[in-house]
Image (cartoon, grey):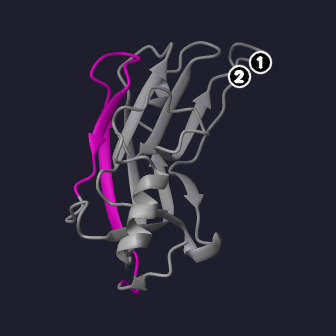
Amino acid sequence: MAKGKVIDQYANIACLTVTETAINTMTATKFNFPFSIMDKMALIINRIEWDFTAWIAALTASADQLRAAITCAAVVTDITNGADPLIVDSFRIIRYDMGAAASGWVRETPYIKDFASLPGGGLLVAPNPLYLMIQGASAAAVGTIMARLFYTYIELETDEYWQLVESRRIISS
């Protein structure tokens, strides 16, 4: 699709933290990139580092879940729906109790998703609007998650930009 002009040579980093407004409530926080929808700028997301360290203790029983996503609208109703074009990336952590009750598992954070090997070097998205969303399922406490995006800017032609916007259904949301 996009043959736009890459204006960035080095990765930029955006970091955002979001906390649920109440236990197991879907909550969104908007990234504040310095472009409006009319600027025809896009991001190529090369990597996302998810840090859920502050939230993992909320998984107190088998099948408890932590869910997070980066979306193009705050109106997403299911952040685990991979077919939703508004979802740029998502993940879910589920607790499974197996064996003795005293068993445990150690997870290194951040949880890294690397998109650099994709065609074009990553995920192409419009920078505005872009949200970080979270939701627990049966979690015992309010959740907090942090996401660090590594990205470069790309300037698109008008038709390329509107094709990108339409593909993510930003206009209708």
Residue ID for mark 1: 98
Which numbered tag is attached to residue 103?
Answer: 2
- Does 112 sit left or right of 77 as displayed? right
x, y percentage for residue 13?
35, 66
Q: Are marks 1 and 2 in contact (CB under 8 Å)?
A: yes
Q: Identify which amino acid the numbered label 2 is placed on.
A: Ser
> Looking at the image, can residue 92 be seen?
yes
| Residue reaching furthest to the right | 99
x, y percentage for residue 76?
42, 32
Q: Quadrant of the C terminus?
A: top left
- The stretch in magenta equals 8-32
- Does 143 sit left or right of 136 as displayed? left
> Looking at the image, can residue 58 be seen?
no
For the point 38% across and 76% down, the residue is: 156
Q: Is residue 27 magenta?
A: yes
Which numbered tag is attached to residue 165?
Answer: none
x, y percentage for residue 29?
28, 40
Vertical comparison of 58 with 44: above or below: above
Q: Is residue 22 magenta?
A: yes
Q: CA distance from mark 1 to mark 2?
A: 8 Å
In depth, the one of 62 and 127 nearer the eye is 127
- Counting labels gives 2
For the point 71% across and 22% down, the residue is: 103
Kindly state the secondary structure of the residue where label 2 is placed.
loop
Q: Identify which amino acid the numbered label 1 is placed on.
A: Met
Mark 1 or 2: the one toward you: 1
Q: Residues within 10 Å of mark 2 (few under 14, many from 20)?
A: few
Vertical comparison of 35 with 113: above or below: below
